[in-house]
């Protein structure tokens, strides 16, 4: 079987984790691909037009392979009036501190997945990765017809099996240390990255990409030794020059601290640095409603430089994150630094 690394034409056994919300800029994606890894654009929050623009920007900066990442379509669960009142009340003090009008609830729809996928595939990325669930057989066929590899995300052995049965080309195995959203949709094992990779390798005959807490060349080496073909790193790139990480987010990362799993910002569990919102919001709406609800607060907080109201996604390895140009970070992770 041709290795995933060969199929993707990668010089380094490294994937830049897709980081939606503006962190994985076209410049960061292109820099990692140019260095020989697989840059990935986190496009989940982008409209189809924004996806096209970002993809064209990547194309201008590199002819190397890169990946595009989307969130698998989610069932939107209805919420009661009481749930909304409680969620609004929890956010009200933060809005007041930021000088924003009181929070309001609107059923603003997320970007349409079919349209996002069509835009993504028209860019002919080398791979289309996804998280939060499965794609349908028709959607996977669409990915394949566009010449892209389909890569799903699993947080446990059963999810990896389900992705393999659905017919993906490779699986991202996300350990509990990972920064950002949990990609699971069944039971999240929150497992050690190496142990989970080993367990999945025993039951799934597909190329694996290990993710979660991989901050050094030694970590990447260990991930490859446990059965992964590639290592996917997110947190390690958060302070890269080319990353879209905002100034207050960068300052908070450099300061470090404890990470927590929280549903406070989006309604889905995600790992990030503890702050006023992770501590103060205890009754979030489900995803995607909570994500929409907290958007005005997050936007205003980034502008005002107030990290205590921002989602500060980071993995447990955050204490080891260093600034620098992305190609240097990539080469260091691959043991060439
Ligand atoms: C800021 C941030 C945003 C993320 N956004 C996404 C995303 O849009 N799609 C996705 O599949 N994974 C996303 N992740 C998770 C990564 O794919 C990956 O699992 C994680 O970064 C690996 O752990 P590490 O951060 O310890 O390296 C994100 C992670 C971070 C830190």
Image: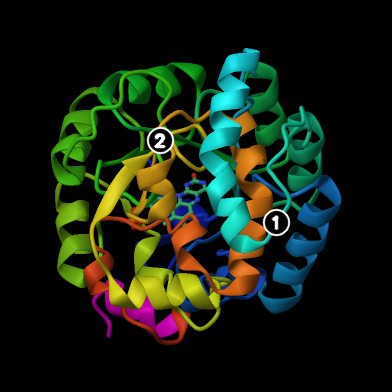
- Residue 105, by quadrant, is top right
Residue 193 position in % (x across, y down): 21, 44
Residue 206 position in % (x across, y down): 36, 33
Can see residue 83?
Answer: yes
Residue at point 65%, 71% (across, down): 303
Residue at point 64%, 44% (across, down): 44
Question: Is residue 115 part of the magenta span, yes or no?
Answer: no
- Residue 305, by quadrant, is bottom right
Disc 2: CA contacts within 10 A as few (<14), some (14-19) or many (>=20): some
- Quadrant location, the C terminus: bottom left
Residue 104 position in % (x across, y down): 73, 37
Disc 1: CA contacts within 10 A as few (<14), some (14-19) or many (>=20): some
Residues shaded magenta: 327-337
Q: Is the CB of the residue bearing disc 2 within 8 angstroms of ligand 1? A: no
Left or right of residue 246: residue 162? left
Which residue in the protein does label 1 denote?
100
Front-lying residue, 173 or 83: 83
Picture disc at residue 137:
none
């Amino acid at each position: 079987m041709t290795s995933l690394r060969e199929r993707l034409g990668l010089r380094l056994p490294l994937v830049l984790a897709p980081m939606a919300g503006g962190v994985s800029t076209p410049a960061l994606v292109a820099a990692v691909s140019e260095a020989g890894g697989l840059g990935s654009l986190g496009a989940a929050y982008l409209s189809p037009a924004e996806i096209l623009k970002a993809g064209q920007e990547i194309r201008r900066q590199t002819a190397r392979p890169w990946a595009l990442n989307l969130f698998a379509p989610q069932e939107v669960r209805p919420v009661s009036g009481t749930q909304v009142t409680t969620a609004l009340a929890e956010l009200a003090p933060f809005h007041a501190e930021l000088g924003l009008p009181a929070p309001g609830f609107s059923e603003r729809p997320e970007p349409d997945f079919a349209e996002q996928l069509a835009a993504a595939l028209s860019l002919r990325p080398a791979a289309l990765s996804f998280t939060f669930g499965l794609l349908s057989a028709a959607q996977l066929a669409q990915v394949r017809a566009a010449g892209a590899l389909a890569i799903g995300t699993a947080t446990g052995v059963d999810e990896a099996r389900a992705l393999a049965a659905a017919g993906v080309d490779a699986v991202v195995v996300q350990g509990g240390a990972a920064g950002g959203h949990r990609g699971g949709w069944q039971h999240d094992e929150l497992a050690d990255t190496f142990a989970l990779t080993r367990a999945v390798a025993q039951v799934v005959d597909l190329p694996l990409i290990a993710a979660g807490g991989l901050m050094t060349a030694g970590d990447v080496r260990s991930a490859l030794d446990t059965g992964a073909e590639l290592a996917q790193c997110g947190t390690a790139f958060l302070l890269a020059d080319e990353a879209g990480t905002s100034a207050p987010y960068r300052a908070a990362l450099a300061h470090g601290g404890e990470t927590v799993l929280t549903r406070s910002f989006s309604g889905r569990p995600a790992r990030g640095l503890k702050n006023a919102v992770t501590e103060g919001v205890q009754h979030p709406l489900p995803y995607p409603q909570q994500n929409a609800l907290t958007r005005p607060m997050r936007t205003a907080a980034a502008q005002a430089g107030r990290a205590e109201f921002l989602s500060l996604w980071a993995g447990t390895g955050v204490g080891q994150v260093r600034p620098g140009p992305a190609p240097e970070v990539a080469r260091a992770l691959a043991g060439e630094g």
